[in-house]
Image (spheres, helix red, strand yellow):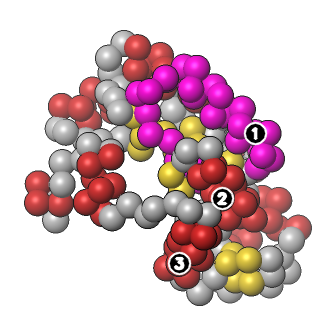
Amino acid sequence: MNFGLFPMLARFQNFSHDWEPEYLEGSRDVIFRNTYRDIEEILTRGTENGTKFEYECYDTGHLYNLAYFHDRGLAKGPLFVQSVFGILGGIGGHPEDLMHMRRTANRLLGSEYEWSILGAGKNQVPLAAMGSSVGSHVRVGLEDSLWLGPGELATSSAAQVAKMRIILEQSGFDIATPDESREILQLKGKDNVNF
């Protein structure tokens, strides 16, 4: 897929680091390579060593690809599907886009997946809140957005997590503990990793 960050060049005049404008401009020519052979190889190798995958789906076509590999037994459930919204080259950040991804995932994957929302940039908090209201987990952090709110830069990922936690708790949702998260995703547990 194409992955364009270059539109940010029109929004910012001052950069903290010399490499930033060049990096953003370079995204005009970036393609995320993800061939069927690549996917099959990583799923085979990863499954052999007990890897649990996060399937980042930037558009509905990615859900169809995931269903293809799941139906053939290469992608093992429960699948952890991270729906990514608002990246140029993928699905947009409109609420209808979120609902379209949810309907498509439900139709293709049924009960074989856990769903999570990743809204890029300004989409982070609104889409996470909306997604949680229809059954998703949420992902927030500086990798996906630099903002805490309109016009307010986040000081850390922890600040974004704290804000999202308040929103979710005030909406009546429980927050999973790390152990509960491991159980939901059927992870092997921190005592079974080598770090």
Q: Mark 1 or mark 2, which is nearer the start of the sequence? A: 1
Residue stretch rendered in magenta on the structure = 92-119
Q: Position of residue 165 (x, y in %)?
A: 53, 71
Q: Is residue 26 or residue 13 the one in the foreground?
A: 13
Within 10 Å of disc 2 (Cα), the crowding (few <14, some 14-19, many 20+) is some
Q: CA separation, marks 2 and 1?
A: 14 Å
Q: Count the marks.
A: 3
Q: Position of residue 3 (x, y in %)?
A: 68, 47
Task: Give the residue at mark 2.
Answer: 129
Is 111 a magenta residue? yes
Q: Which mark is residue 162?
A: 3
Q: Residue at x 30, y 63 (%)?
A: 178
Within 10 Å of disc 1 (Cα), the crowding (few <14, some 14-19, many 20+) is some
Q: CA separation, marks 1 and 3?
A: 26 Å
Task: Give the residue at mark 1.
Answer: 97
The quarter in which the C terminus is drawn is bottom left
Q: Amino acid at mark 3?
A: Ala
Q: Amino acid at mark 2?
A: Ala
As helix, strand or loop, the secondary structure at mark 1 comes to helix
Q: Could you say which quadrant of the image residue 134 lies in? A: top right
